Image (cartoon, grey):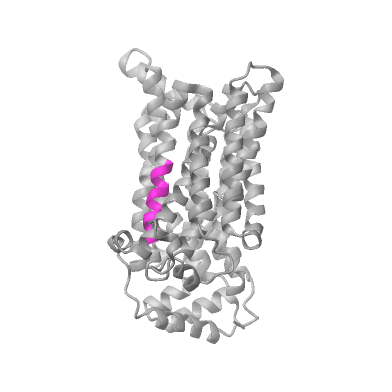
Amino acid sequence: MSDNAGVTKSLLLATSMAVVGSTFQFGYNTGVINAPQKTIEQFFNLTYITRYGYPIATSTLNLLWGFTVAVTAVGGMIGSLCAGFAADRYGLKKPMLYNNFTAILAALLMGFSKLAGSFEMLIIGRFIIGINSGINMGIAPMYLTEIAPVKYRGVFGTLGQLGVVTSMLLSQVLGLRWLLGTSTLWPLLLALTGVFAVYQLAVIPFCPESPRFLLVKMNKEDEAREALQWLRGSHYNSKEEMNQMSSEHEAGKDEQKTTIKELFTVSHLRQPLIIAIVMQLSQQLSGINAVFYYSTQLFLAAGIPQEGLTTVGVGIVNVIMTIVSLSLIEHAGRRILHLIGLGGMCVCSILLVVLLNLQRTVVISWLTLVPILLFVAFFQTGPGSIPWFITAELFNQSARPAAVSIAGLVNWLGNFTIGLAYPSINAEIGGYTFIIFAVLLAIFWIFTYFRVPETKGKNINEITALFQPDRVQYDAF
């Protein structure tokens, strides 16, 4: 590849468009509901009293809040299933462009829900922003990878995850009681998600379609070359990169796309699919969303003062460890980092259960913060990003789209399950809730140790060969 393919201002503009306009939506709307939970629950209760003349039952409120949190994942499932079809048919730029209108609609519904006295508007808005996030998280990472110079492709491919955790931290800061997390301003806090959409709408007309899509899918060689010149600079010689994209396309033309049915019925495809599914479940059923969605509630239960600031502390650790993990993945390997992450989270879960059930003192309350922060740190060491790396690496080009679609669906389903179930389970067993996560983490650790291969330093052919019939160590699947 030509050495003059560097990072230009145009490339940075297109990158900011994809990160701020797309991955920020997912991260912001994951974290934004955390800090103002009690304030919004009061709105639910007052609305219910106004309508029916009596307060909502605690069990009903827990279920309603859990659904409000988790409904984004239902939308996310729908969005993730739409993303692949949209990208294949319309490219990457158009779906990102039109997806912004769903974000603006969601922002309006959530922003005016209090004025209208309708918690249903808030829930519908959360569902719609979930669809938006599902589409964004299916398309934006592909766009970032395809516009990046080859030597920076790994870095640009991970900017999406960094955008997610950064926007999550932003939502936690803005949600503090002395900023927007008040009984008056929380609708504005939720509606700010529309700002990211407006930014993308303003910038995206100046950004090109993916050069790969233009060349490979649309056969528009001149437009693909123009897109590369815009991204790389006017003096960039695009011939070599154009030839490489053409060669990759020619090499894969004879491969038939693998169907979802074949993933489940063909042995050498079913084996890595099971690994991919369990890896996705190890991320979502680890308990991390109980922290991301409900850490404020968790800190209140632990008796920690200034629970809003400690929630921000979780966000800061999340960002720092994401940056650290990105530098570790290629050096330490995927499997070992995932094992370290799962093992550390399991130990932290057990320690958290012990501390939450000790007699409450100031010292014990503050000590509870330690396993929570370490829990987040261990999550970003492995389970935060590695399931997606592994899923993409286990399959060749023909099987990867179907496998990633199934993995995405499982991931959103796990997200929904924890978001919905945690408030009710926590109301029943309180401080013992994380023992469930400890057991699940132990199961996932055992599975990873015995069934997940190391993919570091291997090409796709070497990895897929591990699951061929003659490799008996994987015949148990």
Q: Which picture quadrant has residue 395?
A: bottom left
On-image quarter of the C terminus: bottom left
417 or 217: nearer the viewer:
417
- Rendered location of residue 226, percent (x, y): 50, 80
Answer with left or right where residue 330 lies relative to residue 206.
right
Q: Nearer the viewer, residue 234 or 336?
A: 336
Work out whether residue 40 or residue 88 is closer to the camera in this orientation and state it. Answer: 88
Q: Is residue 249 magenta?
A: no
Query: Where on the picture, by quarter, is residue 46?
Result: top left
Residue 167 x/y as whole percent: 57, 47
The percent position of residue 336, horizontal first and vertical second, equals: 60, 54
**Res 154 quadrant in image:** bottom right
Magenta span of residues: 402-415
Residue 23 makes an appearance in the image? no
Q: Is residue 400 left or right of residue 316?
A: left
Q: Is residue 21 above or below residue 251?
A: above
Where's the N terminus, which quadrant?
bottom right
Vertical order, 155 against 298 (above or below): below
Magenta stretch prevailing secondary structure: helix
Q: Residue 274 in the image: x percent, y percent? A: 40, 54
Work out whether residue 53 can be spotted: yes
Q: Is residue 202 above or below residue 77?
A: below
Placement of 25 over or under 439, stated as above or below: below
Q: Residue at x 40, y 40 (%)?
A: 416
